[in-house]
Image (spheres, rainbow, N blue to C red):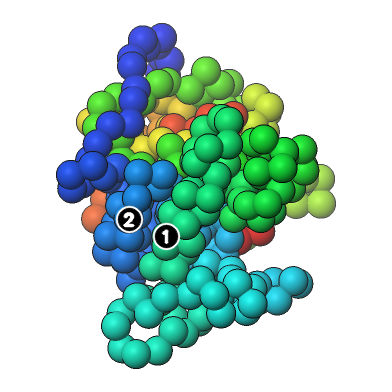
Amino acid sequence: MLLVVGVYIVAGNLVNGVGKGSVGLAKGAVPGAYKDLVQKWGNLCPAINPALLGAQLYQESGFDPDVVSHADARGIAQFIPSTWATHGVDGDGDGDRDIWDPKDAIPSAASYDCELAKYVKDVPGDVTDNMLAAYNAGAYRVIKAGGVPAITETRNYVTRIRSLEKSFAAPVSRVDPSKQAAGAIYYAQKKLGTPYLWGGEGTAADGGRFDCSGLTQAAYESVGITLPRVANDQWNAGAHPARDELLPGDLVFFSDDLDNSRAIRHVGIYVGGGYMIDAPRTGAVIRFDPIDTPDYFGATRVTQDGAKALPTTV
């Protein structure tokens, strides 16, 4: 198969999507069980939108409603119990404010965001950046600093969520092409015929063999972009082009649950013409495979900023 990687000049932007004044969510970006909650409560005030709220929840907990942090932050929105006591809301109207219940915790996260936005509305700078900084470090520190405080954790928190917001939003026009796509494909092409290895990352200990996400990780690492190890985390490394807008170098994903990116189980590198290079399964070799199968989930156009924004653990 002859591969020609062209140069494409396209414009990409995120504009209003689902619902008045709302940014639409990318397909499967938020697990189906929480999508309606995030879409609804993400419109609670002008400082937030559904994509931003989804990105914040992903950064906080990876959508795990049972997680507890080392600081005793709990649940899908990672509220500390003392903060929950004053800012938790009864989102589902059942008479109970349950820190572990996403139907309460997601509305509470949105409500708390909007409260913080009011606290910092007169602080110089972007109100959403200042709001996120206040969520992480407290409104007092933001007000005292006159903006996002010079705290590494807080600045990283703001940067990551604003970058992830672009991945969680559904683009309504073409997104910019990846500058590193050709190099990633070149790397993958050199591995054609290599036997598959579950958990393989192409190291000497692995005999140079890969599994699916090990191959895509190594391909983009070869052009200076560090992706997470697992396929479902790689999904959030950039914006999501539609099937008819795919370009060579896009990552293409497959899942048995087409409404939940956390259920993604396979990934390959699109090369054009409806084909990808992938490491398919035990007993097979890295090869070209068609992407148009019933379990096709969607695609990600990897960017440096998108990859950097991903949590190291979710």
Q: What kind of residue is marked 1?
A: Ala
Q: Can residue 81 be seen at all in this image of the molecule?
A: yes
Quadrant assignment for the C terminus: bottom right
Residue 176 in percent (x, y) is at 40, 21
Find the residue positioned furthest to the right: 205
Residue for point 34% across, 50% down: 45
180 vs 122: above or below: above
Q: Quadrant of residue 194?
A: top right
Q: Is residue 295 above or below residue 180?
A: below
Q: Residues within 10 Å of mark 2 (few under 14, many from 20)?
A: some
Residue labelled with disc 2 = 44
Residue at 43%, 37% in the rendered image: 166
Label 1 vs 2, first from the N-terminus: 2
Tag of residue 110: 1
Q: Position of residue 95 (x, y in %)?
A: 34, 90
Compared with residue 5, is residue 214 higher up or lower down, i.e. above or below?
Answer: below
Disc 2 marks a residue whose amino acid type is: Leu
Instruction: Characterize the local packing of mark 1: few (<14), some (14-19) or many (20 or more) Cα atoms within 10 angstroms.
Output: many
Helix, strand or loop under label 2: loop
Q: Residue 197, position in %: x, y?
A: 63, 56
Asked if marks 1 and 2 touch (Cβ < 8 Å), the reply is yes
